[in-house]
Amino acid sequence: MLAFFISRFHYRLPQLLLTLLLTVGGCQTPPTRLPPPVMPAELTQVNAAVNRQGRPCLGDLCLSDWPDVADLDRLTAWDCKAYAVAKADRLIYLGYHPDRLEYVLVAGPPLRVAHAALLVDGRWVLDTGLRCQVCTLEAFIGGGTLQGRLPVADLPHVRRALRWRSAL
């Protein structure tokens, strides 16, 4: 009897199985582990503290390279890159995983040069106040264009590659 049932529905068996799976819950996707939601107030505190920490550049750009965290205390002035590095370091110290942090670059009017900031959880940008203080990525970009995103953990590797290339 079973052989008759299988042979009779041989061509419809995949459709039957698919229908059974869908009715039993086959379309349900398992929840992914998302990072816990970040409270903007916490980010605002870190942003304000780091913005008071360094001495800002008088011009648009005063560092030719992304600084190491160890170099921040020795710098006479900080540009947007130094502030972004310091904010990433502070958040990592507070327990944020580096995978949650990225450096972002935006360019376009009214900026004369590309501007860097720190992106948290792909949503919140911590800035020096040129574009915003703490805002969404969309607000940070404004009328400009997003030039790039770099995971914080990748910066040492990129810095090493750039220094190696310039030494050639």
Image: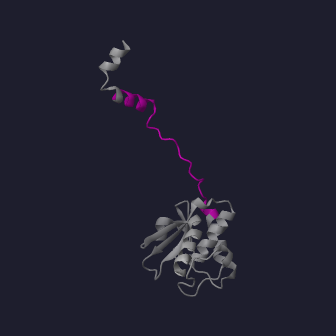
93 horizontally vs 141: left or right:
right
Q: Position of residue 67 (x, y in %)?
A: 61, 77
Res. 74 visible in picture: yes
- Judging depth in this view, the residue of 32 and 45 nearest the camera is 32
Q: Residue furthest front?
A: 168
Render colour scheme: one colour
Instruction: Relative to 17, say whether 141 is above or below.
Output: below
Q: Residue at x 53, y 74 (%)?
A: 116
Q: Position of residue 14 (x, y in %)?
A: 35, 29
When asked about the image quadrant of residue 101, the answer is: bottom right
Q: Quadrant of the N terminus?
A: top left
Q: Is residue 162 shown in magenta?
A: no
Q: Position of residue 43 (x, y in %)?
A: 62, 65
Q: Which residues are magenta?
A: 15-42
When asked about the image quadrant of residue 78, the answer is: bottom right
Q: Residue furthest bottom?
A: 58
Q: Residue at x 34, y 17 (%)?
A: 5
Q: Residue at x 59, y 62 (%)?
A: 40
Q: Residue at x 66, y 63 (%)?
A: 92
Total number of numbered discs in the rendering: 0
Q: Is residue 32 shown in magenta?
A: yes
Q: Position of residue 113 (x, y in %)?
A: 47, 81
Res. 53 visible in picture: no
